[in-house]
């Protein structure tokens, strides 16, 4: 189905990219034509951003992106997703399959990070590291309303 793009030799550039915030991969490297990415479940990403921004404000830090929600449920119902901004191209319902097949060697997920890294390493001809750990975990000090997940998915079909 997807991801039949064979890897070629070259330089590997990695980092966080977001084309709408002025630091898209192609803004810096317009000649790049193959990608590997690790994505996070959009619902889990939204929850993580909520707790990250809430903690920053509680610690007296900056209010990132106009965060103004007093509770997680309200935040999940009103937040805009920028998930597709992580891709190097403008992604739509009409072009996503073509773009993924043409440019991506692999798309992994953080929820299956160790397996994703093993697959990527194999595709690139490397050995995968052992015991991949998530070191950047923010405490969730509110109950997460997982009953809202389907509503969140329905409201964020392509982004």
Image (cartoon, rainbow, N blue to C red):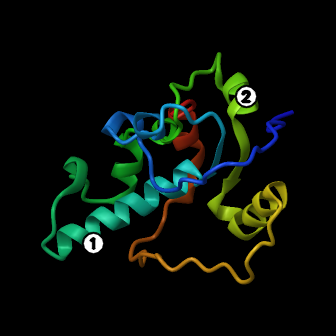
Q: Is mark 1 on a helix, strand or loop?
A: helix
Count neighbours of disc 2 (C-alpha within 10 A) and say few if under 14, some if 14 to 19, many if 20 or more.
some
Q: Which residue lies furthest to the left in this view?
A: 60
**Which residue position is annotated with label 1?**
55
Give the mark nearer the N terminus: 2 vs 1.
1
Count neighbours of disc 1 (C-alpha within 10 A) and say few if under 14, some if 14 to 19, many if 20 or more.
some
In the picture provided, is 120 more to the left or to the right than 65? Answer: right
**Which residue position is annotated with label 2?**
102
Q: State whether residue 147 appears in this view.
A: yes
Front disc: 2 or 1:
2
Say which residue appears at 72% left-offset and 22% top-offset.
Answer: 98
In the picture provided, is 78 more to the left or to the right than 60? Answer: right
- When the figure is inspected, residue 99 is found, relative to residue 140, above or below; the finding is above
User: Where, by quadrant of the figure, is residue 140 drawn?
Assistant: bottom left
In the picture provided, is 94 more to the left or to the right than 6? Answer: left
User: Where, by quadrant of the figure, is residue 63 drawn?
Assistant: bottom left
Say which residue appears at 42% left-offset and 75% top-offset.
Answer: 138
Front residue of this view, candidates 29 and 114? 29
- When the figure is inspected, residue 28 is found, relative to residue 94, above or below; the finding is below
Front residue of this view, candidates 98 and 40? 98
Residue 30 at x, y percent in the picture: 48, 31
Q: Is mark 2 on a helix, strand or loop?
A: helix
- When the figure is inspected, residue 2 is found, relative to residue 57, above or below; the finding is above
Say which residue appears at 47% left-offset and 41% top-offset.
Answer: 25
Distance from Cα at disc 2 to Cα at disc 1? 40 Å
Residue 73 at x, y percent in the picture: 39, 54
Q: State whether residue 148 appears in this view.
A: no
Say which residue appears at 28% left-offset and 62% top-offset.
Answer: 53
Residue 23 at x, y percent in the picture: 36, 42
Q: Which residue lies furthest to the bottom in this view?
A: 131
């Amino acid at each position: 189905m997807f991801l039949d793009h064979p890897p070629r030799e070259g330089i590997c550039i990695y980092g966080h990219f977001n084309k709408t915030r002025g630091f898209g991969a192609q803004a810096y490297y317009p000649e790049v034509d193959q990608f590997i990415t690790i994505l996070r479940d959009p619902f889990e990403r939204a929850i993580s951003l909520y707790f990250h921004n809430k903690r920053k404000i509680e610690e007296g830090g900056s209010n990132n992106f106009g965060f103004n929600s007093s509770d997680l449920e309200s935040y999940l119902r009103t937040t805009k997703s920028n998930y597709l901004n992580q891709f190097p191209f403008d992604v739509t319902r009409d072009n996503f399959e073509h773009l993924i097949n043409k440019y991506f060697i692999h798309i992994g997920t953080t929820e299956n990070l160790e397996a994703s890294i093993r697959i990527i390493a194999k595709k690139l001809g490397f050995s995968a590291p052992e015991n991949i750990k998530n070191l950047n975990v923010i405490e969730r000090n509110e109950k997460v309303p997982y009953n809202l997940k389907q509503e969140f998915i329905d409201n964020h079909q392509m982004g």
